[in-house]
Amino acid sequence: MITLTDEQKSAVQMTRDNRISILVGGPGVGKTTVTKEIVQAALDNHESVSLCAPSGKASRRASEATNYPASTIHKLLEAKMEGSEFVFTRGEVVPLGCDLLICDETSMVSNDLMASLLRAVDVNKTRVLFIGDQDQLPSISAGSVLRDFLNSKVIPTTELNQVFRNSGDIVKSCHKIKIGERYSPSVSLDPSNGLNIRHVEQSSPRRIVETIRELVVNRMPARGYNPICRVRAESLKLSVNSWSTACRRAGIIPSGMSRC
């Protein structure tokens, strides 16, 4: 049985008491634990729950973490293509029928998609909970919905701050960066014990590519990770296409193998 902290209990109660509310916090603070408790409490009260997220990957993570079905916002709203645009079946005329709507990863939701989601809410029936990390980057499309909600100061909000011990060095480093402190990489790599962040500095573009190639092609497979399905390399400066091309030229991603 999970024992909730006082701030986690406050979040559960907030969702029960308000038509619309927000749960925020950085990684490793227990948002998933609270979400599971909120979903279970609603089900115990014979209420229907819809759990959604803006992307397929985020919805799968939400479903796996809560052991409750989740979908993308588009699927929840029963999207269909008309010409080159999405049209949603669910809206003001045919609203969602759930008693509780939970939207995870709200920071990733654009203005337009949030507007469509809110139009589908039955204000006389449905309670809405938005969950996210206010310090994550906003959506790729226009809008910074979660930050705007928080800045309005009119929506009841609970922020979780306690970082749990089993969160690992990645999460601890995230919180240190957030408050402007220096972080220390793990002394060795042992992900099962939370030692899961390393810092490798290279100044030469050639050495950067060589280092990434060594990590992706040799080091990660040696640890049991499939380099195509389980390893992800990102660049803040290159576009996705340019980065993919650079990786293929370096032999990091074989031609024609970009996904599982």
Image (cartoon, grey):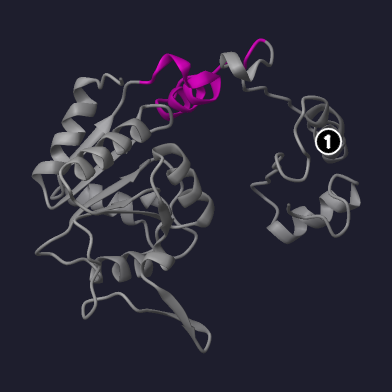
Q: Residues within 10 Å of mark 1 (few under 14, many from 20)?
A: few
Residue 230 found in image quarter: top right
Residue shown at the point (43%, 14%) measured from the top left: 165
Please state if 27 lies on the left or on the right of 213 as rendered. Answer: left
Percent across and percent down for residue 206 are: 88, 39
Residue ID for mark 1: 204
Looking at the rendered image, the quarter that the N terminus falls into is: top left
Position of 12 with respect to 26 (left or right) is left
**Residue at (66% x, 10% y) in the render:** 187
Left or right, 210 with reference to 118: right
Q: Is residue 1 above or below residue 114?
A: above
Specify the farthest residue to the bottom.
83
**Stretch in magenta:** 163-187
The answer to whether any part of residue 100 appears in the image is: yes
Q: Residue at x 43, y 25 (%)?
A: 175
Q: Is residue 18 above or below residue 245?
A: above
Q: Amino acid at mark 1?
A: Ser
Nearer to the camera, 187 or 3: 3
Identify which residue, 179 or 122, lies in the foreground. Answer: 122
Describe the element under mark 1 as helix, strand or loop.
Answer: loop
The verdict on residue 72 being magenta is no
Residue 195: in sight, yes or no?
A: no
Give coordinates of residue 26: x percent, y percent.
Answer: 39, 33
Q: Residue furthest top?
A: 187
